[in-house]
Image: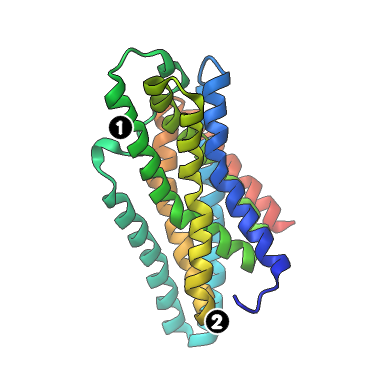
Amino acid sequence: MNSIPVNQLIPAFLLTLFAGLATGVGSCIAFFFKRTDRKFLSFALGLSGGVMIYISFAELLAEARLSLIAACGERHGAFAAIAAFFGGIAIAMLIDRLIPSHENPHEVRTVEEMDSPRHKDKLLRSGIFFALAVGIHNFPEGMAVFISSLAAPGTGISIAIAIAIHNIPEGITVSVPIYHATGSRKKALFWSFLSGLAEPLGALAAWLIFAPFLSEILLMLIFAGVAGIMVFLTFDELLPLAEEYGEHHLSILGLICGMLIMALSLAL
């Protein structure tokens, strides 16, 4: 990565920053809308999941497998791609296990809860823990956007948009309890944006860690690992979250539309 020009590094970092700061969009929605548009969020989360699933299997994993087979031979290359893919899933599962279950970032909070009468101390603690939990989850997402953007800018843009969509309800969930506990929009926005900044930090870590060792084989192993991370994220977070908004058919329709959009864009 050291040999990659600055004019490629900067767009990759900016895409990662864009995806991460979408948590702030969720905060703004919470502050300026009186009700949560459950149908929109359910469809959007399904769309995001469809984009990530299709990219993971049809683009990242497929390209990694072909390149690794060409470099290492059919059997070794295929097994390397499989190992990297499930290694990515294992990393995502490990990160998920680090988050206390009672502060699970998959728990939905809505705009309506701004006015719910709950204990303020508990709310503040819940919101801050949630912001930290979201930050931990966002770290590998930032690595995924950054690496993908460097290797294939078009794919990186699609992944960044998909992750940005799923960060919006996370921003709502961070800001709702903190705003209700403190009455301060500034504090709620601060914690929401802070949780999103974990994504560009993930990008920076990817650049610093992998730069000295980057090769075609390592890049393809990372591609397969990123595919695993995104598949786990979709099945563990996006689709259950879409279901919790109570619009099952819309979330599945969004999933199908996301896959169709990516299929057409890759074909074109």
For the C terminus, the quadrant is: bottom right
- The residue wearing badge 1 is 125
For the N terminus, the quadrant is: bottom right
C-alpha gap between disc 2 and disc 1: 44 Å
Residue 17 coordinates in the image, percent (x, y): 59, 50
- Residue at image coords 36%, 14%: 116
- Residue at image coords 33%, 12%: 117
Residue toward you, 121 or 265: 121
Identify residue type, mark 2. Ser
Q: Secondary structure at mark 1?
A: helix
As drawn, is 261 to the left or to the right of 129? right
- Residue at image coords 73%, 66%: 7
Residue 216 coordinates in the image, percent (x, y): 56, 80
Q: Earlier in the sequence, mark 2 or mark 1?
A: 1
Identify residue type, mark 1. Arg
Residue 108 to residue 208: above or below: above
Which label was assigned to residue 215? 2
Q: Which corner quadrant of the image does residue 215 belong to?
A: bottom right
| Label 1 crowd (10 A; few <14 / some 14-19 / many >=20) | some
Instruction: Determine if residue 159 is in view.
Output: no
Q: Secondary structure at mark 2?
A: loop
Residue 83 to residue 140: above or below: below
Residue 24 coordinates in the image, percent (x, y): 55, 36
Residue toward you, 71 or 1: 1
